[in-house]
Amino acid sequence: MFGQWTGHYQDGENKGQAILNLDDCDTHYKGVMFLNTFSSEHPGLQINVEFKKPVPKQFRFTITKANYFPLNENTGLGYNSWPEYEQKKPNKTWPETIVIDAKRSSASLTFQWKTNTAQTGTIRLDAPRKGNSTLDSSKLTWDEFKARVHKLETRRYIFRGQNQTWRLRTSFHRTHRANLFTFMSEDIQILHRTLSGRTKHIFNLEVPQQNGAFFNMLQHHGYPTPILDWTHSPYVAAFFAFRTISSEESKKAKNKDKHVRIFVFDRKNWVTDIPQVMLLNISLEHFSVSEFMALNNDRVIPQQGIATITNIDDIEKYIERTEQHRAKKYLQAVDLPWSARDKVMTELSLMGITAGSLFPGIDGTCEEMRERHFRI
């Protein structure tokens, strides 16, 4: 049951989007559900949930007023307390209890609810998507790729390289985590205390730019975050796409049909058209672009790095829906054959794009020398 479940809900004539973010906590599942209303007359809800294992196919649970809160229509965040909300909406009353009958399968979850004031409603959620990318891609040779990117408007697009055609997904969501409230309030606080003695700069997580820089540092050092690394350079993206493929592997017959993937994202139009949000644990879906300060992170500048932050597991589907709504194309994919590996890495080296240049320090230098001497 863990992961991000998405769907819709209906409460009388009120309809909206439903998102359930559940983490696997060994003996139970714990998370938060958001009901984002389509109506300006009804606030959305944040509902804290917990299910003991094993979870049967059909079960009943009760939500009390202590476990759900209205959402602030301006911020997408839940109110911290009922008194805070009731001061702003003194004439609005809310049920004390909500009884929910649930049915689950591997593909969906259905919740039928009834309150102590006899209100009823339904939530239907689809299971997290599995599998590789379903994005349409262009299969190009290395020379065709170079010819294409040379025609692109400078600094309008950003690029991301992956050594296989996996779907676009953050390292946080690839661990099957989904509950960003726990991640922010517990995991990050522990990590901040632990790392503060090892960094030259003490990050103030209350300052958005410093908070982003801290996350970006974690991302560049292998800790799972809701951040995706991108670069302004298509050639740096190509380096990361081919970096972990050895010369020997690229030549094996069993790998002749394998491709690396380079995503091409229209950053300029996306930032212009779509509201950009620098918060993670909010109810509304968002995929936002940011260039964080390079504090304690000497890799960002040589990699021409830029980041996206998101609270969405299935990023490709979200962008696809946005493209359909706006009749625009923001995200493209280019696939290059593994067999081009030696040619690509040789040309990138001549351009000055090597592990030594992109990863300042002993590790990067050794990786560059390993590529030069062993082609691995």
Image (cartoon, helix red, strand yellow):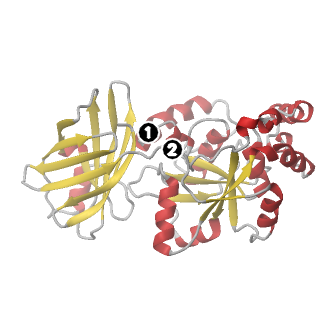
Q: Indicate the quadrant where residue 369 lies.
A: top right
User: Image height check: is 270 above or below 137?
Assistant: below
Q: Which structural element holds mark 1?
A: helix
Instruction: Give the image location of residue 194, x and y in percent.
Output: 58, 29
What kind of residue is marked 1? Ser
Which residue ends up furthest to the top in the rendered image? 27
Residue with the mark numbered 1: 185
At label 2, counting other C-alpha atoms closer than 10 Å, the crowd grade (few under 14, some 14-19, many 20 or more) is few
Residue depicted at 68% across the width and 35% down the height: 199
Instruction: Give the image location of residue 8, x and y in percent.
Output: 30, 57
Q: Is residue 341 left or right of residue 312?
A: right
Residue with the mark numbered 2: 131
Which residue ends up furthest to the front in the rendered image? 253
User: Can the viewer see residue 202?
Assistant: no
What kind of residue is marked 2? Gly
Q: Indicate the quadrant where residue 30 lies.
A: top left
Q: How many marks?
A: 2
Residue depicted at 13% across the width and 55% down the height: 120
Instruction: Give the image location of residue 127, x and y in percent.
Output: 37, 45
Marks 2 and 1, how far apart in space?
Answer: 30 Å
At label 1, counting other C-alpha atoms closer than 10 Å, the crowd grade (few under 14, some 14-19, many 20 or more) is few
- In front of the other: 25 or 176: 176
Q: Earlier in the sequence, mark 2 or mark 1?
A: 2
